[in-house]
Image (cartoon, grey):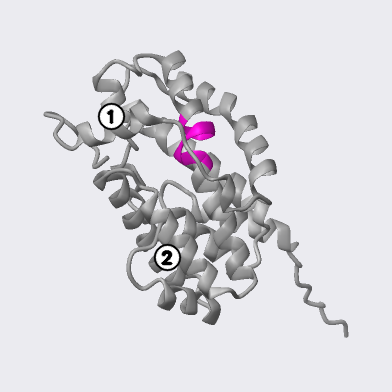
Amino acid sequence: MTMATATRTVIPTPMIDTLRLMAWLSPTYPVGAFAYSHGLEWAVECGDVRDAATLAGWLADVLERGAGRNDMILCAAAHRATAAGDGASLAETNDLALALAPSRELHLETSQQGRSFLDATLRAWPCPALAAVAERLAAEVAYPVAVGAAAGVHGVAREATVAAYGLAFVQNLVSAALRVAPVGQSAGMAVLAALTPRVAALAQTLHAGDLDALGSATLRLDLGSFRHETQYSRIFRS
């Protein structure tokens, strides 16, 4: 008499990590990303973004000279801190990330998404180390810090985490543009595809950098964020 031998498929860790990042940074993850445009709604209102070409230029500046770049640096720093078990550095990184938000709306954008991300991840992927992070960051937590900390706790590679975060940042703004700008889905995806190699290049450079590399030069976006607070007609919270 023969008996069938049960076999178990061993899934490589890098694949699990990739799928985890895809889940965490999916548009369906409950962080409320759909409610924020990071100043894009005002840029459309004033005519800075009016077609696919101007959208691509605006996004490239935000990515490489503004919050996209800074958030990738902060995500990497939070990852390093949690991977090393350095709670003090993690808290300092979070304080800095929150302080860098130049307006009330952008502060709300990062803190609300950060708290939602950390709470949702702790429920779905619980572990003692992540619970300790949530306890240390019990008040406001910046979104890139929450993502970097969760990835560091779960052992997801830092460069991959930073790259995935950067792409999700751009992807959410493209999604916002489809709702407020005269840009169709095909054009929006073409913009995303064109910016993807630039996200990858930034991740290669920034994942190993330190907080001294922080800095931005998107003053018009920052001022536009203040103006968005009193914009007559709007559908986004930032």
Is 192 in front, or is 49?
Answer: 49
At mark 1, the secondary structure is: helix
Q: Using the image as rendered, state which of residue 59 and residue 125 is in the foreground.
A: 59
Residue 173, x across and y down, in percent: 41, 34
Between 99 and 50, which is closer to the camera in this rendering?
A: 99
How far apart, in angstroms, are the residues tagged by discs 2 and 1? 27 Å
Provide residue 100's location: percent of width, then percent of height.
Answer: 39, 49
Q: What amino acid is labelled 2 in the image?
A: Leu
Point out the residue furthest to the bottom here.
1
**Can residue 123 be seen from the camera position used here?**
yes
Q: Is residue 72 left or right of residue 218?
A: right
Residue range of the region highlighted in magenta in the rendering:
62-69
What's the amino acid at mark 1?
Glu
Tag on residue 41? 1
Q: Quadrant of residue 50?
A: top left
Q: Quadrant of residue 76?
A: bottom right
Q: Does residue 14 lie above or below 86 as drawn?
A: above
Mark seen at residue 27? none
Residue under the point 47% across and 36% down? 216
Q: Nearer the viewer, residue 89 or 175?
A: 89
Specify whether residue 141 is painted magenta: no
Q: Residue at x 62, y 63 (%)?
A: 80
Q: Is residue 48 above or below residue 95?
A: above
- Residue 193 placement (x, y as % from top left): 58, 27
Identified at 68% across, 58% down, the residue is: 157
Q: Which residue bears the numbered disc 2? A: 118
